[in-house]
Every structure is written in structure tokens, then in C-alpha cells.
Image (spheres, coloured by chain):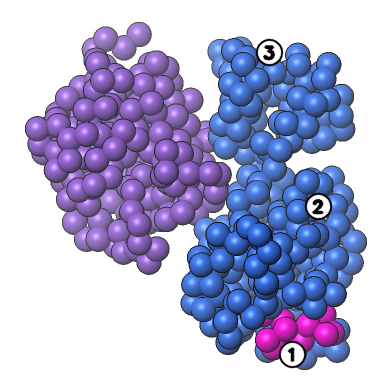
């Protein structure tokens, strides 16, 4: 995003991102500015500051302020079986294709606190595929990953998740998969046996395996066009021929030359299949 | 010249939006972005609006290019923002219990400075007031539905409290006013 002298706000934001990159090696410069600006301003206010430049000053001298900003900038909105129709499409259209492989590798990119990875594990388990699958769930936020590794989610969310699960075509009762412990629903460790939670930054890290299914929902909406292209190249590099890609309900594959490498498997659910 | 119209509506919004969009002609020179609060997931809102207006109406996808004469609706469960000539979606936390939030859209549109028009219609909450104030602060035009003509007056009233110099218009005059403001040749009185 080019800044100009008559857009001081844009310039301040750009300088903040430049400072974070040069001081700490973390690169948010390719993020979509509109949503980033809101998150940054939230941090400015919470730190009791007046300007983005004031925040830049603090961050340069105090890594703890950076830590707090990083929390603000990572996307931690998630739920189990979010958009049940997507998970229904996975069950009906994707799983029959995955079944044809002797071993299934799934990449849940931007897994946040793990709800989506567990949803995928449950679907694979009910299809009898979990034993011969491995789910790689990655995120750039260590705090979220630590939470994900506990395999427990807030008990109060289970009513919503149960409804989602059933609307997604769930065969049983979600409660068969967890036990209530205090305010937490602790999920059956059987689901996590073939699950790996690992740190991976889509902006700066490379492909680390070949996958049969990549699920990356509502993560790239925070990226600008150039960064989206970069990540889509990464995904294309990381999929086996005829591999599957699942995006959020309102996301498109762009640019067009990368979109041309896929055909829709379930167009309405943004579930795609690599052409070759 | 105005190159962006952003509209927020809540309770009673379908009827109000239809009334606002109906007078707009297919050559309407600016893109229009709308946040309508709604609770249902499977929504036919785009279809319902398209039936009674001459513009193209659809739900926004992330990074959609804005086009003159095309109306983009915030999808259920997503914030809609504008950045340059693109629509941006986010799943950030609800703002004052709303996602999509009218404030979020309007505040992002404020970056367009005096090229943005913000419109706040009927509703039973205060969403949009802060966003409309941001638009006004950056030199944009603020229009508020006359609370008297609103199915629910709270939202227009809150907007007026935040933006006392906003133009107040009865529902049926908002569409024609947008046509006038956005017409390419119109010189805007009072604009620097």
C-alpha cells in the first residue's frame, strides 16, 4: 500500500509494521490494511496511547508490548464445525476421495486454538480414516497452539458445537467425544493421536510436506492480494496432484492463473480440487 | 467527486433499503456497500433487494473489486470493510454485539475522505453513529434517515447525536439525494 504525504495515518501504520519487521523479523506488511488498522488502534487505546507512532515507540523498546500486539494481530476466532455446510461437503465429497489413498495427510493452516483440527479428526474418525491419517495443524501464534495442544475447549460452547456437528451430518452425539471437567470439555485423546500441532507462519515459512487436503478458512482474508498470491503458491506447492483445498465461505482463489489450477469440487462451499 | 456510498441498516432495514435503492439508475456512478444486521444464516437479502432495484446486488467476497453501480452486502457473520477499491472481510470479534458491524464499515470508508457518503437508516440500536462521525470528520458526507420516517428511530437518532450536521432526509428522498450527490458533474456546495 503506497502511502502519501497527505495520508499521515497510513504512513504511521506503515512505519509501525516496518519497525516490527526490522526490529523483530515479523512481517505484517502484506496484511490487508483496513482490518489491521482496527486491531492496531485497539492496542493503541489499550496501552493508553494517542497515536500509532506512540505505539511504535513503545514496541521498539519493550518486547512485552510487541507480545500484546501480536496477540491482537493473530486471528483467534474459531469454532468446531464452523459453517456446518462446509463440513457436510467435506464428509460427502472430500472423504470419499481421501479414502482412495493408503495414507492421508491433512494440513489445517491457521488452526488457532484447535477447534477446526478436532472437527476434521472427528470427521475422519467417523469415516474410519483417522487411523491412517495425519493432521498437521499449524498456526503462527504459540499461545493458541499451546491451548490447542490441551485438547480441551470451553464447555459453554458445546451446545453450539453440538448443533453445528449435527447440521454437518454428524453420525453420533458430540458428547461421545468429550468429558466435562470443570469449565472445560476435554476431548478424547484418541482424536489427537495422529495430530501434530506446529508453529508455521504462512507469510515467511515454506512448504513442509505434501498434503491430500489443505483447510485454510478465514485466514487469508487478513492478507493483501500479494500475500494471498504467495500463500496460494505455497498451497499449490504443498498439494499432491488432484489434492483438495478448502477455503472460507466468502474467499476466492486469486490470482486467476492459480485459480485455473483448480476445479471446484463443491463450488458453493469453496472446496476445490487441484486439476493435475 | 464522490466514489463510494456506504449504508447501514438494522431493524426495518429491508423495506428502507429497497426504498433507497429503487430510484437509483443502472448508470449510478459509485459502488455501494451495505451492512444490514440480520440473524438468519441462509439469507435471501441480496435476491430480495435485486428484485426491486436496477443495480447489481450480491454478497461481498473477500477482495472483490468495487464497481460503480454494484451493490455489495456484508455476508452474515463477517465484517465488511473497504480498502482502496477492494472489499475486505474479517471475522474479528463482533463490535457492540454485531458482526457485521455498521461502525466497522463506515470507519473504513472514512479513509476515502471527502469522496465517501455514509448513510444511516432505521434501527433499534446505536450502531453506525461512531462510523458516521468518522466519515464526517474526514470530510465525507453524512446522511441520516429522518427518525420520524424510520420503522425504528433509535439508530438514526444516535447517528444524529454523534453527527449533528448530518443531512436529515425522509426515506423516499435519500435515493434521489444520492443520485444528485454522486452525479459526476455536480459541484458540491461547501466542499473545499
Is A256 on the left or on the right of A62, as rendered? left
Question: What segment is highlighted magenta in the picture?
Answer: A123-133
Q: Give coordinates of residue B37: x percent, y percent.
A: 33, 48
Crowding at mark 2 (Cα within 10 Å: few <14, some 14-19, many 20+): some
Instruction: Tell me the colour chain A is drawn in.
Output: blue
Marks 1 and 3, Cα distance to the nearest angstrom? Answer: 55 Å
Upstream in sequence: badge 2 or badge 1? 1
Callouts 1 and 3 in the same chain: yes
Q: Residues within 10 Å of mark 1 (few under 14, many from 20)?
A: few
Q: Mark 2 near mark 1, Cβ–Cβ under 8 Å?
A: no
Give the residue at the far front of this rendering: A182
**Is A255 in front, or is B174?**
B174
Q: Nearer the viewer, residue A185 or A194?
A: A185
What residue appears at the point 53 percent right and 44 percent down from the top-left corner?
B93
Residue at 86% over, 29% down: A24
CB atoms of marks 2 and 3 within 8 Å? no
Number of numbered markers: 3
Chain displayed in purple: B
| Quadrant location of the N terminus of chain B in the rendered image | top left
Q: Are marks 2 and 1 on the same chain?
A: yes
Which residue is tagged 2? A146
Looking at the magenta stretch, what is its main secondary structure? helix
Name which of mark 2 and mark 3 comes first in the sequence.
3
- Marks 2 and 3, Cα distance to the nearest angstrom? 31 Å
- State whether residue A227 appears in this view: yes
Q: Residue tagged by mark 1?
A: A128
In the displayed structure, A138 sits above or below A120; it is above
Q: Nearer the viewer, mark 1 or mark 3?
A: 1
Amino acid at each position: 500500500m503506497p502511502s502519501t504525504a497527505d495520508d499521515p495515518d497510513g504512513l504511521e501504520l506503515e512505519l509501525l509494521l516496518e519497525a516490527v519487521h526490522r526490529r523483530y523479523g515479523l512481517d505484517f506488511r502484506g496484511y490487508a490494511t483496513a482490518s489491521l488498522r482496527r486491531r492496531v488502534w485497539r492496542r493503541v487505546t489499550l496501552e493508553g496511547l494517542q497515536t500509532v507512532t506512540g505505539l511504535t515507540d513503545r514496541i521498539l523498546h519493550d518486547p512485552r508490548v510487541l507480545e500484546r500486539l501480536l496477540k491482537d494481530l493473530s486471528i483467534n476466532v474459531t469454532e468446531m464445525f464452523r459453517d456446518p455446510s462446509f463440513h457436510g461437503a467435506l464428509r460427502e465429497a472430500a472423504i470419499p476421495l481421501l479414502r482412495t489413498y493408503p495414507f492421508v495427510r491433512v494440513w489445517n493452516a491457521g488452526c488457532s486454538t484447535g477447534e477446526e483440527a478436532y472437527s476434521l479428526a472427528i470427521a475422519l474418525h467417523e469415516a474410519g480414516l483417522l487411523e491412517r491419517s495425519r493432521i498437521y495443524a499449524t498456526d503462527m501464534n504459540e499461545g493458541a497452539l499451546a491451548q490447542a495442544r490441551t485438547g480441551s475447549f470451553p464447555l459453554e460452547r458445546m451446545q453450539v458445537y453440538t448443533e453445528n456437528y449435527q447440521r454437518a451430518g454428524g453420525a453420533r452425539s458430540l458428547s461421545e467425544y468429550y468429558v466435562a471437567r470443570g469449565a472445560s470439555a476435554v476431548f478424547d485423546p484418541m482424536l489427537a493421536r495422529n495430530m501434530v500441532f506446529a508453529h508455521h507462519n504462512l507469510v515467511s515459512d515454506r512448504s513442509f510436506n505434501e498434503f491430500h487436503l489443505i483447510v485454510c478458512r478465514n485466514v487469508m482474508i487478513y492478507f493483501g492480494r500479494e500475500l494471498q498470491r504467495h500463500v496460494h503458491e505455497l498451497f499449490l506447492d504443498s498439494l499432491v496432484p488432484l489434492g483438495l483445498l478448502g477455503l472460507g465461505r466468502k474467499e476466492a482463489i486469486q490470482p486467476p492463473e492459480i485459480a485455473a489450477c483448480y476445479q471446484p469440487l463443491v463450488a458453493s462451499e469453496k472446496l476445490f480440487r487441484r486439476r493435475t | 467527486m464522490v466514489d463510494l456510498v456506504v449504508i447501514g441498516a438494522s431493524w426495518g432495514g429491508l423495506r428502507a433499503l429497497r426504498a433507497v435503492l429503487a430510484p437509483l439508475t443502472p448508470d449510478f456512478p459509485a459502488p455501494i456497500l451495505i451492512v444490514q444486521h440480520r440473524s438468519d444464516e441462509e439469507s435471501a437479502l441480496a435476491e430480495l433487494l435485486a428484485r426491486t432495484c436496477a443495480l447489481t446486488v450480491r454478497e461481498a467476497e473477500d477482495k472483490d473489486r468495487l464497481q460503480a453501480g454494484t451493490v455489495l452486502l456484508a455476508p452474515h457473520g463477517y465484517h465488511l470493510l473497504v480498502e482502496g477499491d477492494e472489499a475486505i472481510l474479517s471475522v474479528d470479534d463482533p463490535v457492540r454485539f454485531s458482526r457485521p458491524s455498521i461502525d466497522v464499515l463506515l470507519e473504513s470508508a472514512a479513509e476515502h475522505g471527502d469522496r465517501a457518503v455514509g448513510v444511516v437508516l432505521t434501527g433499534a440500536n446505536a450502531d453506525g453513529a461512531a462510523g458516521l462521525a468518522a466519515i464526517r470528520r474526514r470530510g465525507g458526507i453524512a446522511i441520516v434517515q429522518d427518525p420520524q420516517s424510520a420503522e425504528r428511530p433509535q439508530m438514526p437518532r444516535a447517528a444524529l447525536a454523534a453527527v449533528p450536521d448530518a443531512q436529515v432526509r425522509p426515506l423516499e428522498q435519500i435515493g434521489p439525494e444520492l443520485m444528485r450527490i454522486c452525479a459526476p458533474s455536480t459541484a458540491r456546495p461547501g466542499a473545499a
